[in-house]
Image: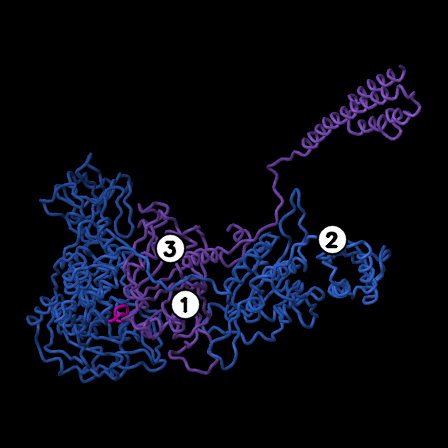
Amino acid sequence: MKVSLKWLSEYTQVPGDLKAFCDKLDLTGTGVEGVEQTGEAFEGVVVGHVLTCKPHPDSDHMSVVTVDVGAGEPVQIVCGAPNIAADILVPVACVGAVLPGDFKIKKSKLRGVVSCGMCCSQRELGLGSDHSGIWILPEDTAVGTPIAEVIGSGDTVLDLEITPNRPDCLSMVGMAREVGAMYQQPVAYPLAADVAKLAAVTAGEDVAASVTVDVADPERCCRYTARVIDNVKVGPSPDWLAERVSAAGGRPINNVVDVTNYILYLYGQPLHAFDYDLLADEDGQVRIIVRGATEGESLTTLDEEQRTLTEDMTVIATPRRAVALAGVMGGLETEVTEATTTVLLEAADFCNGRTSRTSRNLKLISESSMRYERGVDENLTELVSQAAAALLAEVSGGTVRPGVVDVYGAPAAARALTFRIGRFNAMMGADIPADFIEDILVRLGCAVEATDDADVLAVSAPTFRPDLEREIDLYEEVLRLWGMDRIPPTLPGGRERVGARTPEQETLRTLNDTLRASGLNETMTYSFAEPGDIERLRLPAEGLGLAVELLNPLNADQSVMRQSIIPGLLRSVAYNQSRSVKNIQLYEIGTVFSAADGRKKAKERKKLAGVLAGAMGDDGWNVRPVPFDFFDGKGVLENIARELACPKVRFKALTAEEAPHLQPGRAAEIMADGASLGWIGEIHPLVVEAFGATAPVVAFELDVSGLVRVARSARPYVDVPTYPAVAMDQAFVVGEDVTHEKMLQVMTSAGGKLLESVALFDVYRDEERVGAGKKSVAYSFVYRAPDRTLTSEEVEKVHAKLVSKVEKATGAEIRA
Amino acid sequence: MAIAEELAALRERTLADIAAAGDLEALDAVRVAVLGKAGSLTGYLRSMGSVAPEERAFVGKAVNAARVEVEEALASAKATLEAAALAAAIDAGAVDVTLPGRAQQMGTRHLINGIVDEISDIFMGLGYKVVEGTEIETDYYNFTALNAPADHPSRSMQDTFYVRDLSGDAARVRGESDVLLRTQTSGVQVHTMEDWDLPIYMIAPGKVYRRDVADPSHLPQFHQVEGLVIDKGITFGDLKGTLDYMCKQLFGTERKTRFRAHYFPFTEPSAEVDVSCAVCHGEGCRMCKHTGWLEILGCGMVDPNVLSMSGIDAEVYSGFAFGMGVERIACLKYDVPDLRMLLEGDMRFLRQF
């Protein structure tokens, strides 16, 4: 909403300190988005006195003049205007001035004669249409005066952000009321005086004789008024009117259209002027029908766009065709033109929601639709129509037919509310006096009366404030105009509260800490996915459910919700690799979605996913990081299992059928307490390639709820040993099919209570020394008794038994 | 007294050898040669039997004296040599301390979650609980229960992502659906009001979605932290004090806040909160668009309609709610030039935080 302060000051006093005024507007709820000084356009344009005027030596229509501009030496200017002469006062745009249209005045040569400026016509200054010659100024004007002062066009225009609850502020009158309340200043409202002018221009037959209005559905249009203005001469608007329309951000078009726009800016009531004759049926009667559009109905709007309409849009129609898109824009066919002599003036109130949807769906937002969307005061519609008709007749030389066609179902009534002063102050944490409250409410247009209870005010809220529906709405008005900055800050004093994390939040915290300590960097990827992502990943669809489909995706490759985080992470791997970043350690904890037929809300599961590519850093002077493989990912999961104290964790090899997305032989399922938590492995090289990345990429994806379920908050204490241990090393040669897990099972069961720990410290393969299809696995055993120092005989006996059991159970041979 | 002379000579020679020993090995050779099993001084002790009885006491004494003297000399020489060896080893072990250390590489928290953690910690310190909700929400919980008008522009297909409703229910507005990607985390607050006992002190951080094409200043998915307090006697002053405390914790105690009246359907009265600009301290600069203030969150007293819809008596209880965009805070704190960096997973970006 553009507000000219010059215009506003006709109704209420505008503070002189612009910065303070803007701050106060901001704080009371009217955001100032821009401040424009329109006088600035004339900077460098001053009143000049033409001293001499001679013909141009090399041109028969140009003159060379010297002009006193009030400062320094007179300047020489080449001028082409026919009315230039010596000893007249003219506007001079000096070198450096910028005229409307971004026209910069420079020193130049015109047919060999130097010209240091320009004598201007009115049109060149953007002040009117007169371009017949130089604008000759009155003789009493002082030389050197800025032209802005002479014409008084210096104005400040504020661009204000009006919140959706304040339709009343989308008008000059509404802003005057608001500013009056902000500063507790009087406001002079112009409506009564404007309406009073109607009687003098009224003539002819009652409008009801020639116009009928049929509102088919009052829900679409709660009030429709029509007036007719005859003998209209369409032409340019008077300067004051054009200036007002421009100041409000509009473009002056002709006197009829300018009046409708002026009234809209002034009172916030949208109007539309039809060419009566183009609207009338063959019998000269106008039959207006306000109805829903038919599906696919076509209408060319004023902007010369052909629009295809849908049923929920409302049109103004004659029995033959639609002529305007209700509340949004008029039709081109019935537009007021220079040929128009009779105008039908519409002032109506259309349904907020439909107007807003219509303008959005057609991507057509107009000054009208903006106001209808927020709500127009239907109680004022007819009065504003009177003011508009009177002004239209005045500026176009026409006359207004007596009467009005006014279809108005149930008039809106003022709302009766109460205001409990004590409760208000208690809720605000303030002590705002009753007389301030009453004064503010009255200034905002409410009627306020005392009640039997001194604490309670009876308030009647005006129909132009549809947002004032309840007591709390009044509280807001008083609070914002009192000033939120005047409320002392406090903290709630409630007793019954403690801040605490849920077990899941605790687990997530541990999880994040562990992942970071393991060297992984948290990232985020899109929750959106491409429909083929799961197939591209080759992830088994079992258990993933249906993809959640977006009805209005931004683009095809983001048209469903993800079912796995891995595709997003693989894209991030590719993103990094394509930028020569080789070492990638990423994880994300996020939601995946799965829909099912018959279910409204899709299931959401939190997943933890990670990818590793490259190594844990670059080669350094003292470190040589090893390229990532399966075991780096597994190490991360082992850290997690340890930190969350997950019981009975085991890794189970996954076959190529079970995990087609993983490289066979490097794929496992992680289990805890018998339940699957997720998978880990090296992504299949072909899958990596399909996502544009370079293998190997180690990845894992776990179910967070599974982790939360098995996580233990504490591990049991185990006594720190007091007796010495005996360490033994032993290497076995076993077949490749004998897993470490199998070896551990045999060894721990054979070692009994005295075997404290077993650690694998070497795996060695050599066809000659170890044998084909075999491996040497070397373990370090620690034997200890909790209550005594073990003798070497005891240890040797247990160890020998262990070795022989391993030999028997696994076919292992002892390696010397 | 040939023995005495011999001993004296041996002592002299041995002390000279000790003094001459250049390292611990040479010193030990001297020790072995003199005091070892076959050592020269040991030889005297062994041959005591062949010494005349009347001389034994004297010789024994002399031999022992020589041995004590030699042992002391050996110990002292050994200490000196050891000190020298340690000094040499220390010299040799000197390093260039400016060389990089050897450390397990640590990972990093995502900038956005880092800020969410910070905000959560602030509010947990104030006695709030942190609550999460689902990202897919129904129209009711995302809009209606929050007092959003039926035709509010934010509900349009242009602004909200709608999801195919597989329950078979028909949509109220053509092209829309009853199910959507939440555009705010406020729905969590409604669930909380319905499900929890009063009083309520909670924040709801989470991912939200709006139908904006990703560009440097927009993302179709971003994060919000919204908060809700409902208790007896909650005032607008409490709202101011709480958010002022949060802003000072988050941005620095020297920062100021200001509350500008605004409009949100969920709250009444409503306000937007600005913090003073860190660059110009309120003077006005490019960062704050010459206002001296940076908009940081929206807030207000919970609208009584919202309370009643959740079955809470608005005459007895009052409350406040607030919401802020985490990405916006990230931009203000770190001057991130392009929001899309937050979703690319670029290691060079992630490892900065």
Kindly tell me whether residue B13 is visible in this rendering.
yes
Characterize the magenta stretch by its predominant secondary structure.
Answer: helix
> In the shown orientation, is residue A283 left or right of residue A96?
left
Q: Where is residue B59 in the image (x, y as percent from the top left)?
A: 86, 20
Q: Which residue occupies the foreground of this view, A258 or A214?
A: A214
Q: Where is residue B127 in the image (x, y as percent from the top left)?
A: 40, 60
CA–CA distance in space, label 2 to label 1: 62 Å
Question: Could you say whether the residue bearing mark 2 is in a helix, strand or loop?
Answer: loop
The answer to whether marks 1 and 3 sit on the same chain is: yes
In this picture, is A197 found above or below A224?
above
Q: Where is residue A160 in the image (x, y as percent from the top left)?
A: 26, 59
Q: Which residue occupies the foreground of this view, B73 or B105?
A: B73
The magenta stretch is: A369-375
Question: Is residue A374 located in the magenta-colored stretch of the structure?
Answer: yes
In this picture, is B315 found above or below A26?
below
Residue that carries the numbered disc 2 in the rendered image? A725
